[in-house]
Image: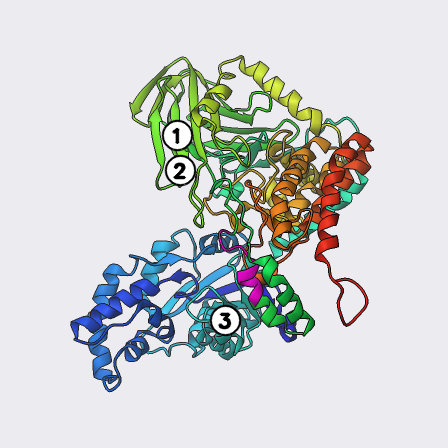
Amino acid sequence: MLYLCAENQKKRTMKKLVIFDLDGTLLNTIADLAQSTNHALSVLGYPMHEESAYNFMVGNGINKLFERALPEGEKSEENVLRVRKEFVPHYDRHNADKSRPYPGIPELLEQLQLQGLQIAVASNKYQAATQKLIAHYFPKIDFVAIFGQREGVNVKPDPTIVEDILSIAKVDKKDVLYVGDSGVDMQTAINAGVTSCGVTWGFRPRTELEEFNPDYIVDRAEEILKLTNSKKTMIKKCFLLCLTICCISGKATAQSNNNLKLWYDKPAKQWVEALPLGNGRIGAMVFGDPAHERFQLNEETVWGGSPHNNTNPNAKKALPRIRRLIFEGKNKEAQELCGPAICSQSANGMPYQTVGTLHLDFEGINQYDDFYRDLDIEKAIATTRFTANGITYIREAFTSFPDRLLIIKLTASKKKSISFTAHYTTPYTENTEFCISPRKELQLNGKANDHEGIEGKIRFTALTRIDNNGGTLKVTSDSTLQVKNADSVTLYVSIGTNFINYKDVSGDALKAARQYMKQAGKNYTKRKEAHIAAYQQYFNRVSLDLGSNNQIKKPTDRRVREFSSVTDPQMAALYFQFGRYLLICSSQPGGQAANLQGIWNYQLRAPWDGKYTTDINVEMNYWPAETTALSEMHEPFLQLVKEVAIQGRESASMYGCRGWTLHHNTDIWRTTGAVDGAKYGVWPTCNAWFCQHLWDRYLFSGNKNYLAEVYPIMRGACEFYLDFLVREPKITGWW
């Protein structure tokens, strides 16, 4: 939960530079620090300390750490240097044994970098170790400066380290956010005159941070994104405004618009630059690299954990006392009681996870010209085109709606010109298998992760079949296929899981993948036509024409950059239709609702775990469904509501109430407990938000049979409130 001091709200301006402390902020290093310090103490014959004791020894540089670790009467400068001599070589060898980034930190840094913000590190750890750890754990992040303790420079809270970073970044103090976990960090920010943000996941207690009255205190890494208020975020909000306006004013007419393409003149370098394909069940991100093509893969039911609910049985007993404390004005005491009594003591929700990536590595394509790639959102097809060695290559890809496969077509203007190797990768480090199936297909078997004590039971199988026209296809290793000198090639990717429903994971992943693969090998042109027809039955219901100008001739990424300063009405229309495209591709009847990632995710821990954040986020996914003639896409969410209402009886019961409810998060297992923390997790009102969608569907359809079906769900939500609400004793009314 983001904590913002009221008197400091004026400081919430757009930031250009974020400076992070290292230990206790980016990395949990305490175990390795404790181990190396205890090693040094042991060598010198001094008593060692418990690991937890070091939480309060670190923060002012290693010399201060050693002074605090030495026994009383031994805290001389000479002894400090003796400990340092033993510590440094040991720590240099072992500083990454147990140290790990805090949850959400790698994703946070990537997002900040994508938003164009500068990132720096200011640590009291000695310089060599600081640089080594940053390079080891965050190799993809381009830090503007990495400063640890340097000879001749005072340690924090002296502001010199911040001032040195500012001189490199060339930004004003008002544009800087300083993030740390201790009072030393907060004082450093104060001394430097920059905006301060304390984090509660580090080595020091929240009370220490509060003593310094920081501008912000955050409990989760992703909350820092809200504080940067980047320009790109503002542009996104502008687009969303356009989308809202367009939802209201769009006309339902037949559609034929050749300008409905996102196109680019260079391959994607990062995942967010790749082009999304999806048929509700499987998703793919297409990078478009001529030499090393990638298709990052998802399947809608690949989630961590397994069937469970996460309600807290202590809530009913504690609720009267919590209410009494609130009535007495003791809000802090009530909140502290809510944590163990109401918030889940088992799990905070399961993460939506990836499958892996299909790699195609091409021979003989070292240089290329005339590069072009696009996503045609009128046809739901991604195309890459380029010239190499005088040969024009074209690659088409689509996630077929009727066939439920990813289908890829490779062609060349000259025969015998297509040669490549194909293989899978995945970020899972265990419970995976790469092999070649008996049918000469690439095969990836895997299992989603355990999470927060809940066993991962989702198993998945990805198959890739390669049909080559001309040339040869052979197995070159136990996990690699090679195509040589083909005229054209068609690839079929199928993914199956053992998921049956939110209570049942008894299916057969390989059998499911095989069943979908039965559609492979049919006439490509007919498969493509069937795909377009199935997609356009939804997409073609609405058109939007706001006019156009010469901006339409520019690549899409350039148009996005220029949108805030150059008139581009067609870009707003394109964005509107892109929103409809994404909903069609990530939410199909009979499947799962679009989560916070839609259906596209390359990580094992997506931002906010990719869950269903039910206090507005997942609802926002579906606001355009009925208004833009995509009623069928609304069905997976309505099914989620029905299933959550069943699980939510446990949440109502834990308060001693009838009906059903849920809190601010759920997942594929339809968990309904309060999660993440008392400040924001004790929110048993999302049943009402869900019921609004049930009612809206009736208003748009006028179907009284449907209304009769969902009425018991809405009634159950009302019963919960009738039982849960109590009168405020000091005033008349409900609370």
Quick one: quadrant of the N terminus? bottom right
Q: Position of residue 49 (x, y in %)?
A: 28, 72
**Residue highlighted by disc 3:** 206
Q: Residue at x 49, y 51 (%)?
A: 347
Q: Residue at x 52, y 35 (%)?
A: 301
- The answer to whether residue 179 is above or below residue 110 is below
User: Which of marks 2 and 1 precedes in the sequence?
Assistant: 2
**Residue highlighted by disc 2:** 426
- Which residue type carries mark 1? Leu
- The answer to whether residue 563 is above or below residue 321 is above
**Residue highlighted by disc 1:** 444
Q: Position of residue 202 (x, y in %)?
A: 43, 66
Q: Secondary structure at mark 3?
A: helix
- Label 3 Cα neighbours within 10 Å, binned few <14 / some 14-19 / many ≥20: some
Q: Is residue 95 left or right of residue 670?
A: left
Region of the chain picked out in magenta, as a range: 337-347
